[in-house]
Amino acid sequence: MKKNYSPWLYQLRKDRAIEGLREDVRSDVAIIGAGIAGISTAFFILKNTDKSVAVVERYKLAHGATGHNAGQVVSYFERGFASLVDEFGLELATQGQKAIEDTWELLDEMYTDAGLNIPFSRFLGHAGLTSLDQVLLHLKNNLLRKNGGLNTERMIIGENIEFLHLIPEEYTGLYTLVPQDEIVSLLETKEDGYVAVLSYQKGCINSALFCEEIMLYLLSKYSERFSLYEHTPINKVVLHDTVAILDAGNHTIEVSRIVLCTNGFESLTVIDKAGMDINTKFHDLVRGTVGYMSGYLEKMNKPPIAISYLTDPDSSTDDPYFYLTRRVYEYEEKKEYNLISIGGPELAIEDSKLYSHDTDFPEEVVDSIDAFVKKTYDLEWNKKIDYVFTWHGLMGYTKNGVRLVGPEPKNKVLMYNLGCNGVGILPSIYGGLRISEFVSEKEMKKSIFDVPTKYP
């Protein structure tokens, strides 16, 4: 059996000093979780306020979902824009979508401020569609995007596809007919079952390495106001009217605000001494899904790309799909390759406590990914692929697939920036900015990311 071996953690510094909590401390803000959500939240609070920040991590920086993801940077939700409009209305859905798309600029801001030179590629990525239902779903999304004033996603459809006459006239101008060869070429495949391609800005980044570099910058830039405590599990949080006490075993952290940036809270007990009982069932609504990925190396003779393959013709966004990312990767010192990363297989788990990073990578998943690669990614069946990396990670999904960002309605000392939802990099960064605005007591408008006042 293969081990959980992530290409992102492979590139982290092996000699970085790690320190846990050694005494009782006081800080303005405590952030639980040192993944991309926690580090981004720390970045924007430190930059936009005068508050002190302590980040607390039960294991090591970026070793959770941030170090075990697909590394794709995308601005979409794993649900159609039309469904967001159905739930929140066109105005709020548009504002939420625009906020995530504008987060590309926040990512650039973090790169510039920290002076980073680690690889970050941005390009036009693609998704291959296989049915009329999928085409109509994304055309509806595009029409609503247009009505809301957003940029539409580029869609091309094969000019000889038999269902063209079934596309409603209201979608005229939202797609272009092209020869089938163009579809096959964009998807870099030999398969002819794809009927359309949806294209929009995507990127790729090692989010674990990004977190490490940002963290080092914060320690240097804000040495008087920033601290990181690893190997420091927090098992209990006691909320009062204006403060919170974090129980770290032998020591405590006293803060004015606490931000939860974790995948789930099954091991965290929240006690509200202010008298307003927080509905702990809310925390159970962040369900766990294990995502599986494999990666191998090729010569660096093609540009970076990210492609999704919607192999199931059903239009439901809940159906699994395969995704492939190609990016430059330094596996050996001063020798660059292209790393081909493929994911898609997932496993829902009822309790995230059942998940362990140390679990072996199932052979049947390796075989499933290998079969997809050889069938789709322009390879021959008789070519043996050496999967240098096989990794899996626990993703936290909110009930509606939208990140929860903001204060707990029943006690604003407690705040949230959570919900990977499968596409977590940009939403995590945006969540960090939004939390900093709450901390600075800026007047905030209603958004799709608000924490609900009532839970099912």
Image (cartoon, rainbow, N blue to C red):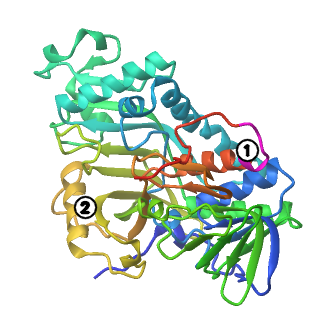
Q: Nearer the viewer, mark 1 or mark 2?
A: 1
Q: Residues within 10 Å of mark 1 (few under 14, many from 20)?
A: some
Residue 2 picture quarter = bottom left
- Is residue 439 a member of the stretch shown in magenta? yes
First along the sequence among labels 1 and 2:
2
Left/right placement of residue 227 relative to residue 2 reads right
Work out whether residue 363 can be spotted.
yes
Residue pictured at 47% horizontal, 68% vertical: 7
Q: Which residue is mark 2?
A: 369
Task: Give the spatial CA distance, label 1 vs label 2.
Answer: 42 Å
Dot 1 falls on a residue whose secondary structure is: helix
Residue sitting farthest toward the left? 162
Relative image position of residue 176 (x, y in whole percent): 31, 17
Relative image position of residue 193 (x, y in whole percent): 15, 37
Residue sitting farthest toward the bottom? 250
In the rendered structure, which segment of residues is drawn in magenta?
438-443
Q: Quadrant of the N terminus?
A: bottom left
- Residue 437: image tag: 1
Give whichever of 84, 212 is nearer the camera: 84
Relative image position of residue 366 (x, y in whole percent): 25, 69
